[in-house]
Amino acid sequence: MNPNELVAAAFQALETAHAPYSNYRVGAVLLCSDGTIFKGCNIENASLGLTNCAERTAGFSAIAAGNTEFKSIAIAASSKPSPFPCGACRQVLAEFCGPEFTVYIARSADDYETTTLGELLPHSFDFRSTND
Ligand code: THU
């Protein structure tokens, strides 16, 4: 799936969001190294803190299905602002993805920004790190 298709799929994924509190629906599509994709949406809860972001929904679905190698993720939202992943989602992605992991953030259905996990989360916490 190319980046344009991935972004289009992220817009489809936000259709199943449960976001009655923020009214900000988010979709994310994670592309695995073998070409498999996993969709996610944000799932809010009346006790707000239990909300799960679209990125983590996609990531946890992939991990639970046995996929741990990822190439990229596309993220789309139902309205502005552009859905840059929150700090928690960046750290969750860093558990499985290196700094070169590509992140496509939709500005609209036909416009997206390309960045990497390394740019979004430099110096992520990592038990495997050899740094002091
Ligand atoms: N949200 C996401 O799902 N992903 C993002 O990248 C940004 C924020 C959700 C969480 C919450 O349901 C709503 O957007 C407002 O913060």
Image (spheres, rainbow, N blue to C red):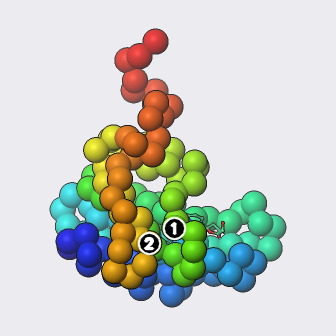
- Using the image, tell me which numbered label, if any, was put on residue 107: 2
Kindly identify the residue that appears in the image at 43 percent across and 78 percent down. Answer: 108
Q: Where's the N terminus, which quadrant?
A: bottom left
Q: CA distance from mark 2 to mark 1?
A: 6 Å
What type is the residue that disc 1 sits on? Ser
* Figure check: 21 above or below 88: below
Image coords of residue 131 (percent x, y): 41, 16
Image coords of residue 41 (percent x, y): 52, 74
Where residue 45 sits, quadrant-wise, is bottom right
* Figure check: 10 above or below 69: below
Kindly identify the residue that appears in the image at 42 percent across and 85 percent down. Answer: 12
CB within 8 Å, label 2 to label 1: yes
Which residue bears the numbered disc 1? 82
Q: Residues within 10 Å of mark 1 (few under 14, many from 20)?
A: some
* Figure check: 24 above or below 125: below
Image coords of residue 58 (percent x, y): 44, 66
